[in-house]
Image: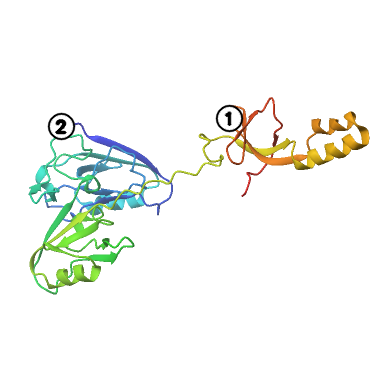
Amino acid sequence: MAPIVAVVTKDTKDQTCGISLLRNTNPSDSKPVIIGGIAEDGLFASSPLLVGMEVKSVNNTAVSTSTEAINIIKETIGQLTIIADVAPVEAVPVKVVSSVATTTTATIPSSSATPVATGFLDFRKTESVVAVVTKEKKDQKCGISMRNGSNGKVIISVIDKDGLFASYNPALIGMEVESVNYARVSTSTEAITIINEAVGELRIKAVPPPVKKKATPASDAPKGILGEGGQWGKNKYVGANTQAAACIGFLCCCLPGLCILLCPMDERDAYKHTDGKVYDASGKVLGHSNNVSFIPTRNAMSR
């Protein structure tokens, strides 16, 4: 695979780019600088960069540690260029769990339709994820925080950059915790208690939060009328007031008094559809705008 070039514009020095790199602070270490996460609302959200790619250079400067790369990114104002390539499969140990109880290594074949770099996993597109670390002693800080979500789920809220779960940051943030060391948890207190008591292998199983569907705006049209773009207004018609005036006119002027019927006095709310038809507030067709009275109003009708 040819190297990927991503170019964005950073307006100010302190502008957040929305990209995180896995820790590798030792220049003599052969481990590559790996993209650990790309924020959906960051500068690189629409770039060709993928989670798990190896960063080759930033602004035409080769980087061997995540610190070097981050410093260049932070200091840049204007054009910011990152060149990356698919990293070795063994670069980051990530495990995933499918909907069944089988655990497999996260090796994604190059022919997969999933848009991630070979050997890496985009956590947001999986059914579940198991993050595995080793806690050497009981009082060792893991650097992970959780909260109780409004939906009754335990949510991962913070992952410290120098904690045991740093390599999973920010991919796990916002995910719902299903279990800790195979024990299902329903509150953040239960989860943290198990984490605090654990010694040795510590595993957290989490799932992406459900995708929220965007609410469809309610139509302003009368009930039963499909489509948008119509307009509310007034329709003059022969109602009780007009009929009463016509009766008085007939008694006073005989037949000429009925001419009042040609100039209706009664008004009602009406809706003119884009097809030219005019409806009353209940959705009943009054006729075409060429044949019935319709006076547009600036504001939509309130009922």
CB under 8 Å between discs 2 and 1: no
- Which type of secondary structure does the marked residue at label 2 adopt? loop
Q: Residue at x 19, y 67 (%)?
A: 191
The residue nearer to you, when weighing 173 against 11, is 173
Quick one: label 2 or label 1, which is nearer the N terminus? Answer: 2
Please tell me how crowded label 1 is: few (under 14), some (14-19), or many (20+) other residues with Cα within 10 Å: few
Residue 71 point in image, percent of width and height: 30, 53
**Separation of marks 2 and 1 at Cα, in angstroms:** 48 Å
Residue 187 lies, with reference to residue 284, above or below; the image says below
- Which type of secondary structure does the marked residue at label 1 adopt? loop
* Residue kind at label 2, given as amino acid type: Ser
Q: Residue at x 73, y 41 (%)?
A: 267
* Residue kind at label 1, given as amino acid type: Thr
Residue pointed to by mark 1: 274
When asked about the image quadrant of residue 281, the answer is top right
The quarter of the picture where the N terminus appears is top left
When asked about the image quadrant of residue 300, the answer is top right
Residue pointed to by mark 2: 111
Query: In this rendering, would 235 be left or right of 141?
Result: right
